């Protein structure tokens, strides 16, 4: 038996496959951190298996999966990443389960006004924070927001994309246990930050005096979340997806600001 196990681990290393044991795992977009924790707890309370979550930027998580670290489930902030993994034969076809619009968070002392939002982020004296595009869908959605603003104010895309400080969504950080935005404002790294409205609402609870507002619909774009199971996942993974798509799962997601 010992020789068999040694052979198994040696073969896994040779093939470049990760080796782990224990709870089934779910890779999830960082913006899902609060909602996913409750989804997992509620599912477990109803007799389901407890999934071990790993949070990070969806693009970075996708690369981790493509490099051989394949979880049972992947909940991405963009179908682009689940679709790519489906086409590669790594994950099963994904299901869309939530949407999330973009909002602007402003430090204490700055009040966000809908009529002045665009002027505020374009102001050269205002430090603007964003997530990193390509690595994090929140960054991709933000860059699309810049393009929509540019249609109304030519030159805005160049100004905004060049001034934006890309402070989140760069890599998977397993040590990070909370959303990063409160720390960014406490450390006074930016004056305003563009992120999902769910993140804005959560951050406002942690920073007294902080304000936030959703961008107007004519420039906003809604993030689409998709979840899929790996091709080798157990039936437990599909049962968890069914729970996320159920009325109870939808209730939990809505509670955290998803729609």
Image (spheres, rainbow, N blue to C red):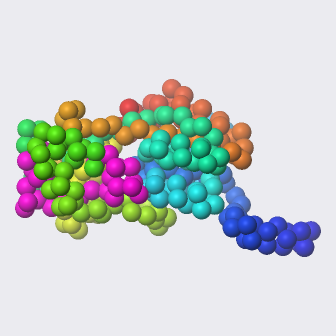
Tell me the quarter of the image containing the C terminus. Answer: top left
Q: Quadrant of residue 254?
A: top left
Answer with left or right where residue 251 lies relative to residue 115.
right
Answer with left or right where residue 12 lies relative to residue 161.
right
Instruction: Identify which residue is drawn at 47% across, 44% down.
Output: 80
Q: Which of 87 and 241 is in front in this view?
A: 87
Q: Can the viewer see residue 164 in this picture?
A: yes
Q: Which of 120 and 198 is in front in this view?
A: 120
Counting from the top left corner in percent of width and height, residue 128 is at 18, 58
Indicate yes or no whether the magenta region holds residue 168: no
Indicate yes or no whether the magenta region holds residue 132: yes
Instruction: Identify which residue is drawn at 49% across, 34% down.
Output: 96
Instruction: Identify which residue is drawn at 18% across, 61% down.
Output: 163
Answer with left or right where residue 157 lies relative to residue 55.
left
Counting from the top left corner in percent of width and height, residue 117 is at 12, 44
Magenta region: 117-142
Tell me the quarter of the image containing the N terminus. Answer: bottom right
Q: Quadrant of residue 15?
A: bottom right
Q: Can the viewer see residue 204 in this picture?
A: no
Q: Is residue 41 above or below residue 169?
A: above
Question: Number of labelled discs?
Answer: 0
Counting from the top left corner in percent of width and height, residue 170 is at 39, 63
Which residue is outermost to the top?
247
Q: In this view, does 94 lie above or below 180?
A: above
Instruction: Identify which residue is drawn at 59% across, 44% down.
Output: 87
Q: Is residue 100 above or below residue 27?
A: above
Answer with left or right where residue 153 lies relative to residue 257.
left
Counting from the top left corner in percent of width and height, residue 55 is at 48, 56
């Amino acid at each position: 038996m010992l020789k068999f196990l040694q052979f198994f681990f040696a073969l896994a290393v040779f093939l470049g496959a990760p080796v782990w044991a224990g709870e089934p795992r779910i890779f999830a977009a960082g913006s899902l951190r609060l909602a996913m924790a409750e989804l997992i707890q509620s599912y477990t309370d109803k007799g389901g298996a407890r999934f071990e979550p790993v949070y990070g930027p969806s693009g970075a998580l996708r690369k981790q999966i493509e490099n051989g670290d394949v979880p049972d489930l992947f909940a991405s902030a963009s179908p682009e990443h689940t679709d790519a993994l489906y086409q590669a034969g790594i994950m099963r076809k994904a299901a869309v389960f939530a949407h999330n619009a973009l909002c602007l968070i402003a430090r204490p002392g700055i009040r966000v006004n809908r009529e002045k939002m665009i002027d505020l982020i374009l102001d050269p004296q205002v430090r603007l924070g964003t997530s990193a595009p390509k690595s994090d869908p929140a960054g991709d959605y933000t860059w699309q927001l810049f393009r929509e603003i540019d249609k109304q104010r030519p030159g805005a895309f160049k100004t905004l994309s060049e001034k934006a400080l890309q402070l989140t969504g760069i890599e998977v950080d397993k040590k990070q246990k909370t959303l990063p935005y409160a720390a960014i404002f406490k450390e006074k790294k930016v004056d305003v930050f563009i992120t999902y409205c769910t993140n804005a609402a959560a951050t406002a609870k942690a920073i007294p005096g902080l304000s936030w507002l959703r961008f107007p619909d004519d420039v906003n774009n809604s993030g689409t979340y998709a979840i899929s199971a790996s091709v080798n996942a157990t039936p437990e993974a599909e049962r968890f997806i069914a729970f996320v798509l159920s009325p109870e799962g939808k209730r939990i997601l809505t509670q955290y600001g998803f729609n």
